Amino acid sequence: MIPDMAINMNVNASRWVERFLPLIVPGGRVLDLACGPGRHSLLLDRCGYRVDAVDRDADAIAGLAAAAPRIRTRVADLESGAWPYADRAFDGIVVSNYLFRPLLPLLLDALDVNGVLIYETFMAGNERFGKPSNPDFLLRPLELLELVQGKLSVVAFEQGEVPAPRPAMVQRICAIRGAGTLLPP
């Protein structure tokens, strides 16, 4: 079992994301997908990573760019446009509270050797707690685990009900492309 390596630099950041950031190569290039106002982008930037942040909300991206000029920001509709990172490879990809299934294989392809995928979002059963409740935005049981099987090495996987920050049904995975180390040095 991996010890809880929480960085605790941003109260609003996901504990799951904080826990596994140390697995990403120091100073590496990290994509924060569907970043919203950038809670994870800001954390990544403070930790010394080179951050690319993308979201379709131009106002959120503008605010993030103003707050942290080192972060490479991009406004893009990830669900209707071309994949903007087809020619890029990342040392880490962070996704939180977002699901668009056609992007999932593209994310795996965008990981560099020893790249780390840190992903968490809502899953089936969340409709009991409110939104999201549309099955298009809820992972099926074991879906992230099945996605990476045979492609990435799983470091940690969880699914089920969580009480905080609000009651929800979630699924989380941290996985590494290749035969990289599972713990930071």
Image (cartoon, grey):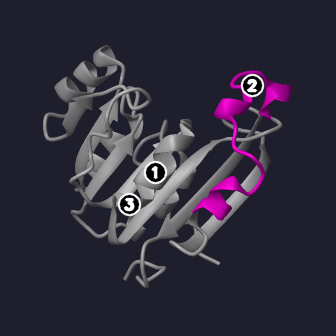
The numbered mark at residue 133 is 2
The residue at the point 69 percent across, 25 percent down is 132
Dot in front, 2 or 3: 3
In this rendering, position of residue 66 left or right of residue 115 = left
Earlier sequence position, callout 1 versus callout 2: 1
In this rendering, position of residue 22 left or right of residue 29 = right
Measure the C-alpha gap from mark 1 to mark 2. Answer: 30 Å
In this rendering, position of residue 95 left or right of residue 155 = left
Above-or-below relation of 25 to 58: below
Residue 3 at least partly seen: no
Instruction: Indicate yes or no whether the magenta region holds residue 135.
Output: yes
The number of numbered badges drawn on the structure is 3
Toward the top, the furthest residue is 59
Measure the C-alpha gap from mark 3 to mark 1. Answer: 30 Å
The percent position of residue 121, horizontal first and vertical second, equals 61, 42
Which element is circle 1 on? loop
The numbered mark at residue 8 is 1
Toward the left, the furthest residue is 69
The residue at the point 39 percent across, 41 percent down is 33
Q: Which residues are magenta?
A: 126-147
Look at label 2 and name its amino acid. Ser
Residue that numbered label 3 is attached to: 109
The residue at the point 57 percent across, 65 percent down is 148
The percent position of residue 29, horizontal first and vertical second, equals 24, 57
Q: Residue 127, located in which quarter of the rendered image?
A: top right
